[in-house]
Image (cartoon, helix red, strand yellow):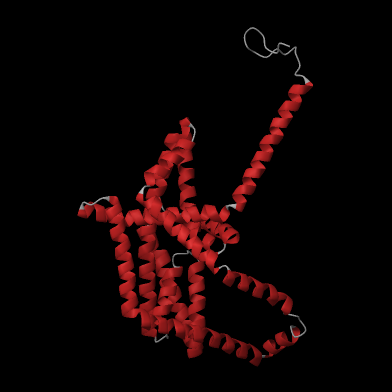
Amino acid sequence: MRLFGRDGQSDPTIKPSRYDALTDFTLRVAVVLLICVGAFILWRLTEAIMAAFASIVIAVAWRGAARPVSDRLKISTPLSLLAVAIAVVGCIGLATRLFGSYLLKQYDDLAQDIPTAVAVIKEGVEAHPWGRFLEHFVAGVDLSKATAPLAMHFASLIGSLGHVLAFTAFILLGGAYLAVDPDRYIQGLVALAPGSRRADVSRFLDRSAEKLRRWLSVQLYVVVLNASMAGAGLWLSGVDAPIALATISGALAFIPYFGSIVAMFIGGLAALPQGLSFAFLAAGVIGAASFIEGYLITPYLQSESLALPPVTLLFFMLALGTLLGVLGVVLAVPATVVLATAFEVLTEKKS
């Protein structure tokens, strides 16, 4: 049956057969099923995808640190990468040798002070009338049902230590391979794109790498300055274990918004055995360091191209944290940088 006329256009007088309608419906169902299967596979591979993204972030940071070494010393990229790795390991080893025992002692003090602070809080709650009322109110509650899943989760967490180590090794090895020869993988990704989109994909990858490199350099300054300010303030305030609390505050500065809140809570809890005033003082010092870093230093270091809308950033941190836990929260900001770059490239193409 001829469905087309001489000019190649469909003949309106001839209606499609039931076979053609069934074929069209089958194709639509197949496409929907393929999309669902693909979404399910991506859902199951979420951790692997984020691990690959973490490897990319490490590779970008590694090559960003190796670039000035290669330019100054006029050596090849693999040698500059090796020099950076040796320098990092050497600095960590030297710092451990010089301050390791002192820092470990402070961390040990924190491990003893925090349970003491929890006991102090419990005694304070029991001493007040509303605390006794609350204790009487929950006296008949069976907490075993609530604590049993927590204990099982903690046991599974301890049991998966090997999985965590293997996960970390995969991220580091993946970052090393990507840092040594990124062009091979970039060319492979570009080749997967349609011919008309390869220029856009290449521009997106180059721009994402550059923005991630700049963001990581800013975060390095942020972490160091936050730890320095918090450590100096805690030491001058007479709070115990100032270096340990400063390292925690600096490390958590890598996570916007939530990191400073957690650092303030840990600092106040650790200083509570010294007295309530020291607890507020420690939390205030860490909060002041985070405020100066977040509202004065970071906006100055970041250009407009790196500035991210706070609501968007909070949404991605919440979403990735729900999906992947701590790893999702840590990688939320660089993932948002990459997605913002993709949106920027798409809008440039349309305009």
User: Residue at the bottom extreme?
Assistant: 127
Query: Would you say residue 275 is visible in this rendering?
Result: no
**Residue 227 position (above or below residue 189):** below
Residue situated in front as seen by the camera: 13 or 98:
98
Quadrant of the snapshot with the N terminus: top right
Coordinates of residue 135 in the picture (x, y in percent): 71, 86
Query: Would you say residue 129 is visible in this rendering?
Result: yes
Coordinates of residue 253 in the picture (x, y in percent): 44, 67
Q: Taking 166 as reference, is 183 left or right?
A: left
Q: Taking 290 as reference, is 262 left or right?
A: right
Q: Quadrant of residue 219?
A: bottom left
Residue in view at x 40 percent, y 45 percent: 207
Q: Taking 77 as reference, is 247 left or right?
A: right
Residue in view at x 37 percent, y 63 percent: 220
**Residue 119 position (above or below residue 206):** below
Coordinates of residue 71 in the picture (x, y in percent): 23, 52
Coordinates of residue 346 in the picture (x, y in percent): 48, 39
Residue in view at x 47 percent, y 83 percent: 110
Residue situated in front as seen by the camera: 107 or 219:
107
User: Residue at the left extreme?
Assistant: 73
**Residue 346 position (above or below residue 181):** above
**Residue 244 position (above or below residue 169):** below
Residue situated in front as seen by the camera: 304 or 225:
225
Residue in view at x 20 percent, y 55 percent: 73
**How many dots with numbers?**
0
